[in-house]
Amino acid sequence: MIGNSPYTAHAGSYTGGANGIYWVEVTGRRSGGLVIISNITEGARRNVHSTQAAVEPDLLYPLLRGRDVKRWSAIPSAHILMAQDPETRRGIAVEVMERKYPKLHSYFSRFEEILKARAAFRRYFRETDPYWSMFNVSKFTFAPWKVVWREQVSKFSAAVVGPVGEKPVVPDHKLMMVEVDSSDEAHYLCAMLNSAPALLAVTSYAVEIQMDTHILENVNIPKYSPRNNIHLHLAHLSEAAHQAAAGGNEAEVQRIEAEIDRYAAQLWGLTEQELADIKQSLEEA
């Protein structure tokens, strides 16, 4: 089970220290489809002024922050403005913003100097690039189904996040994510990551506050197959664990986790005694 997995993890979207501009709350709606947003300045690295604006909703996505993720739970609590072209990996072209999203363009213009002054912007982009360009944004960012975990956490744990309405959820850069093709695949991968064997493997080498993309370079989780009954069982168990966690039923979560451990051990070819040793080692860690 130790080795490189066929899955690849990525860091979430990065504003370059401008969370207070891109992270927003939806406070109302106007006729014509516009939404009223208020930027979230609490805890922002840069000193930006609080403001409200009516903008087009097209580039507004549910935002998943580190605080939103726990074991078997990932619930977005804010929104993020994603004026980024995942193909070019730069901000949406100026002429497109002016034509299709004039209200959002006007909002960004309030912060033009701050956005241009970002160190990461000056390093990775040209002066002619749109100043609202972001980082760590690609096609994987907009995948409907993802498995996520926090980079800074004392105990590694994962959760599944799916779309909210018709919009995919966008994790921030404090979260690691793996994009997958379906809900079942996401839950299978999450179950394997949260299993006792995987947790022991991670605990044995990873520094507690650096649970980044390397996890799947060291824990060899087989690629999901809908024709594999063990994979399907694990997917259903993860879904049940998410439901139990949402209902606060810790006893049911523990029962499901024990079953996940047995299936994961079977998939990796571990004996019952080896699984028992793994669990004992985790208790002593």
Image (tube, rainbow, N blue to C red):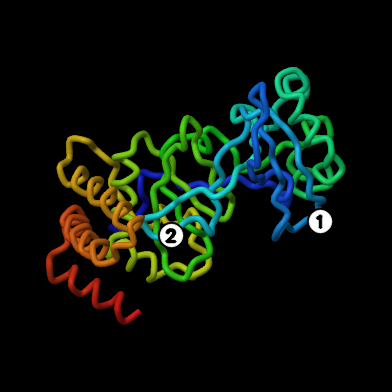
Residue at image position (53%, 38%) is: 141
Q: Secondary structure at mark 2?
A: strand
> Which residue is tagged 1?
47
Q: Which residue is mark 2?
A: 70
Disc 1: CA contacts within 10 A as few (<14), some (14-19) or many (>=20): few
Residue 29, how many percent across, how many down?
Answer: 65, 33
Q: Are marks 1 and 2 in contact (CB under 8 Å)?
A: no
Quadrant of the snapshot with the C terminus = bottom left
Question: Is residue 281 placed above or below 231 in the rendered structure?
Answer: below
**Amino acid type assigned to the residue bearing label 1 in the image:** Asn
Q: Which residue is painted at 53% across and 64% down in the image?
A: 152
**Above/below status of 79 relative to 159:** above
Query: Dot 2 surroundings within 10 Å: few (below 14), some, or many (20 or more)?
Result: some
Residue 72 in the image, given as x and y percentages of width and height: 36, 56
The answer to whether 263 appears left or right of 71 in the picture is left
Q: Is residue 23 left or right of residue 114?
A: left
Callout 1: SS = loop
